[in-house]
Every structure is written in C-alpha cells, then in structure tokens.
Image (cartoon, grey):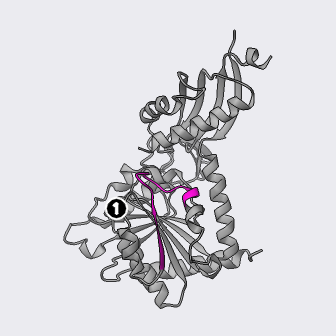
Amino acid sequence: MKPRILDIRKGVLEKNDVLAGDLRNRFKDAGVFVANLVSSPGTGKTAFLERTLSLLLEKGYQAAALVGDLATENDAVRLARSGANVRQIVTGGNCHLEADMITNHLQNWEVDLDKLDFLFIENVGNLVCPSHYDLGEDVRVVLLSVTEGEDKPLKYPPMFNSADVAIITKVDLAEAVEFDRDTAIANIHNVRPGMTVFETSAKTDMGMDVWLRYLVTQQQESTTATPPS
Amino acid sequence: MHELSIAYSLVATAEEAALQVGANQVDVVHLRLGQLSGVVKDALLFGYDIATEGTILAGSTLQIEEVPVVVYCAECDAERQLPNIQYFRCPTCGTPTGDIRQGKELELVSLEIADYETTHS
C-alpha cells in the first residue's frame, strides 16, 4: 500500500513561539523593556548585569532580573546586591531558557510588571542552544569578553546572527590579553552586518554610560511607540 | 545537548498531528533544517531515536532536508545563496547584507503514514 502523506508545515518550536508572543504582548502592555542576555560561560554576564541594574536603580528606574542557571542560585544572590528584585530559574541541567519557564517564574513573584521599566533575562551560559528560543524579549544581547578570542562570532554564527546588540565585556583587560578590537568587531559584523556594538567594563564602568543611554532610549521608544491598551 | 529537547518537541508535534487523523503508526517524518538553525543534524538524528521510543513514531525514519541560507542583496536586487554562514556578504558583489530570506527553518513538513487508510476505515 502506498504511504499516505500528511502535510503539516509547522515550526517544531511553535509552542515556544506562541508563548513568547504572549509574553511580548504582556511586556508591551506593562510598558517594560525586556533584554535577553546570552553568552558563553565566563563572559561576565552576571557582573555586567549587576552593574547595569545598580546604575539603572541609581538613576531612579525600576529594574528587575530573571536569571537562568543549570544548578546553583549563586547568580541571583550576586545580582540581588544591586538592590534589584532578582529571581533565579534553576533549569536542572537544561542548557537554555524557554518561554514557559519565564511565564512560570513571573507568577507569584513580588515584582509587578506594570511598575517596572526594565526586565533582564540572564540566559544560561551557552552560545548554541538559547538561539532557538524566543523569550518575548525586545532585544537579544550577546556578550563577548576580550579574554575569549576575537573569532568567537565566527564559531557561533547562529547565535551572533540572532542577536540585536553585541557587548564586548572586560575591556579593562584588553591590553593585557592583547585583544584585537578591530578584528573582533569585524567578525561580529561579518556574521551580523550593522549590529550595534558596545564596549564595556563592569569593573571600571568604562562604556557603561553609553550602554545605559541606549537602554533608556530604547525603553522610551518602545513604550511611547504604541500606547498601552 | 539541545538537539534532544528539540527531538522531543518534534516528536510531540508529529504524534499529535498523526493521532488527530487516526493514525497508529508513522513511518517517515520529513523535516526542513536551515543552516542557521543551529541544530546539528547528526545529534538530532541520535536524539530522534530516543525521543520516539514508546510513541507511534517508534522505528520511524527522520528525513532531513538541509536548507542553505539565502540572503537578499539590495545592491544586486537579487536573492543569493550564502556559501559561508560566517560571512554575510553578497557572494556576487561583496556587499554586506543581513536580510535573511531562508535558512532559519526548523520545520516539520510532513509525515508518511502507511496504515492511514486501514485505521481510518
């Protein structure tokens, strides 16, 4: 008997995409700007986020973070030092965050989305898996430290290509590790032409002001572009 | 290894569709896999065998069609296939372009169901 063909034409991660779409609407209605931070382990995501949260709070903005980790709650403890509300998502070995984990962790959280200006989602340190999973963010931010090697974007094109903004971290160490800035930026642009790149140090605050200005401008644009329904 | 969790999503989607039409066994699953999807074909095939265990897809074949990246070049006003995903430049004129028209697919295309007719009658 001839096999019967059943046409489906459906994205394998459609369920995640639908949930992410719901989250995006919710964030928009609440007027909160959401950034999804992705990088390798050890790039300095947590230090960068801790400093970002502190600076935003100092300027009078309301900011909070959800932080994904394989096993420990260490990052949430560190980030809480900034004074922001932080909730850990322990993925139990899962190498990335998915939209339903965000939905679940927004429930029973002391944070009211309506009162927030910024929500950061620190993804699990991994440059492969998180690229597939939309979390409803406004921007996906990929971080690369000067200690990692300038060719990282060429090794992980899908992740760098899926990001909206790139941050080069630990620039205070650039000279010591002979970081080739031009090559790194050229590699980022080879994989994602025209991507905005920020160069920062969470330790010395170098470049943090430019990053903060970007965030505030984006937040204002996203909340004024479409008035909350 | 995220290919395993993707394999589980794939199997769940396929099984749901097959059960909806009353099938009790799926023989072949056709998937389109973009070069920019970030999914490793061999790892997905390995994960597939594990994910199908105990489902109506057990023993089925996963047929993967690999989809190259196609970008639009404004300079040439044409779509071009990218020879290398590390360089988002028009292969003809060298202009950088991030306008991706194809290559991110992770799409369940169709199922082959051998006993569809018999189970349905």
In the rendered image, which quarter contains the N terminus of chain A?
top right
User: Would residue A85 be found to the left or right of residue A137 on screen?
Assistant: left
- Left/right placement of residue A41 relative to residue A37 reads left
Residue reaching furthest to the right: B121
Which quadrant of the structure image shows residue A137?
bottom right
Chain ID of residue with mark 1: A
B118 over A161 or under it: above or below: above
**Magenta-drawn segment:** A85-101
Q: How far from the left and from the top, in percent, is residue A218?
A: 58, 76
Residue A167 figure quarter: bottom left
Please rate how many residues cluster around mark 1, counting C-alpha atoms within 10 Å: few if below 14, some from 14 to 19, many from 20: many
Identity of the residue drawn at 37% across and 70% down? A75
- Residue closer to the observer: B98 or B32: B32
In front here: A18 or B30?
A: A18
Apparent side of residue A63 relative to residue A157 in the rendered image (left or right) = right
Q: Position of residue A93 (x, y in %)?
A: 40, 51
Which residue is outermost to the left? A176
Task: Identify which residue is drawn at 60% across, 41% down.
Answer: A12
Q: Which residue is mark 1?
A: A184
Residue B53 in the image, given as x and y percentages of width and height = 51, 29
Residue A52 seen in the figure:
yes
Magenta span includes B1: no
Q: Secondary structure at mark 1?
A: helix
x then y, percent, for residue A27: 64, 70
Residue A89 inside the magenta-drawn segment = yes
How many tags in the picture? 1
Q: Is A25 rendered above or below residue B58? A: below
- Asked if residue B34 shows in the view, the reply is no
